[in-house]
Image: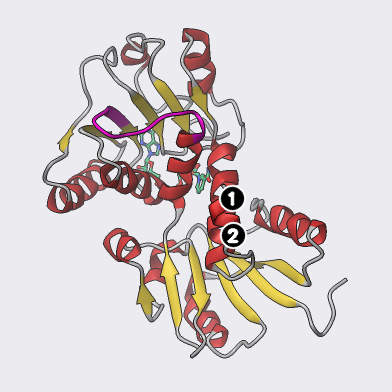
């Protein structure tokens, strides 16, 4: 029951009906008997500035999660960014510091890495192909580079998005070989779909079928799309015998990181993952 003592956190987006965080967090709060609630806030882009301004003075709100389309806009509006959020120009979590200033972080990449780690996949010295160089794809690319990936091939339907990420990574990670789409997938350690391909209404696959024909059984194949859980790419990969990692696995792995950052979960939750 929400009462006068309840602490409030929120997830902001536009639209908002699709988000899973309120379900996940409110089940967690109820299970742990924590007097907190997560509310969904459908907020128009032009109102995000005023909303964050109000958050600076909200004493019973410790933070908010940020989803599409506000991740970039919100990064420009907070008072402080973690180094990775500053480099990526996007946030998916904002917390209110004790003095009322707002700090933003981008945890999508870490969530992906934790889910991959759960499969025993480590990026150090490996070869990867990432499809989709937008918000989530960029965060994953950043974490792969931080994790010591040796070779990262990038693909995006938009040449401008591809070029932007390519330049950003080349500047910060000169030791990583960044290339375009390879001719074959046969010696790939990791294939990631970081694009919406596979969601209803989007392209079925993020890569040409002819190229996917060269996918071998030892490649770890991951998707960020959460619905459907088994995307056409993951279904194809499973048929080839590849280990597969789903979008909900990434979301679930990220929850303690997000919860701790916005002050909705205790610190030890991160260590327990
Ligand atoms: P975005 O719009 O910022 O970026 C998407 C990128 O994919 C764009 O650069 C676009 O040009 C590219 N793209 C689209 N279709 C493509 C195709 N067929 N082939 C290659 N590239 C293509 O979006 P985003 O915020 O990065 O979200 C991407 C996906 O990640 C969405 O489906 C979203 O629901 C999902 N997501 C998952 C999690 C999770 O925890 N699993 C978290 C956040 C977002």
Does 122 appear in magenta? Answer: yes
* Residue 202 falls within the magenta-colored stretch: no
Specify the quarter for ligand 1. top left
Q: Closer to the camera, 208 or 77?
A: 77
Say if 241 sits above or below 58 in the image: above
Q: Is residue 272 left or right of residue 164?
A: right
Image point 72% across, 77% down: which residue?
A: 7
Q: Residue at x 17, y 36 (%)?
A: 178
Residue of label 1: 272
Q: Is residue 240 above or below residue 39?
A: above
Q: Quadrant of residue 22?
A: bottom right
Residue 267 placement (x, y as % from top left): 57, 64
On the image, the x and y values in percent for residue 266 come to 62, 65
Image position, residue 238 (x, y; %): 52, 14
Q: Are marks 2 and 1 in contact (CB under 8 Å)?
A: yes
Please tell me the numbered disc located at residue 94: none
Residue 85 in which image quadrant: bottom left
Which secondary structure class fits the magenta region best?
loop
Is residue 14 in view from this perspective? Answer: no
Residue 54 in view (yes/no)? yes
Give the tally of numbered discs.
Answer: 2
Find the distance from the CA under tag 2 to the CA under tag 1: 6 Å
For label 2, the residue is 268
Q: Secondary structure at mark 2?
A: helix
What's the magenta region? Answer: 118-129
């Amino acid at each position: 029951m929400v009462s006068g003592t309840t602490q409030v956190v929120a997830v902001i987006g536009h639209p908002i009906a699709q988000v899973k965080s309120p379900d996940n967090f409110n089940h967690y709060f109820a299970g742990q008997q924590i007097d907190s609630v997560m509310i969904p806030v459908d907020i128009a882009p032009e109102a995000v500035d005023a909303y964050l301004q109000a958050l600076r003075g909200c004493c019973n709100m410790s933070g908010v999660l940020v989803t599409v389309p506000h991740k970039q806009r919100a990064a420009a509006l907070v008072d402080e960014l973690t180094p990775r959020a500053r480099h990526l120009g996007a946030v998916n979590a904002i917390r209110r510091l004790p003095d009322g200033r707002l700090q933003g972080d981008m945890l999508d990449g870490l969530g992906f890495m934790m889910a991959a780690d759960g499969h025993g996949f480590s990026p150090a010295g490996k070869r990867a192909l990432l499809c989709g160089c937008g918000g989530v794809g960029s965060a994953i690319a950043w974490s792969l580079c931080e994790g010591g990936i040796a070779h990262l091939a990038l693909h995006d339907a938009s040449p401008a998005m591809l070029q932007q990420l390519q330049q950003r990574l080349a500047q910060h990670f000169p030791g990583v070989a960044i290339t375009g789409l390879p001719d074959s997938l046969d010696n790939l350690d990791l294939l990631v779909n970081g694009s919406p391909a596979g969601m209803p209404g989007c392209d079925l696959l993020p890569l040409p079928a002819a190229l996917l024909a060269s996918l071998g059984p030892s490649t770890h194949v991951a998707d960020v799309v959460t619905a459907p859980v088994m995307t056409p790419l993951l279904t194809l990969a499973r048929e080839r015998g590849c280990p597969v990692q789903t979008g909900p696995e990434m979301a679930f792995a990220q929850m303690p990181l997000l919860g701790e950052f916005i002050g909705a979960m205790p610190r030890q939750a991160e260590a327990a993952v």
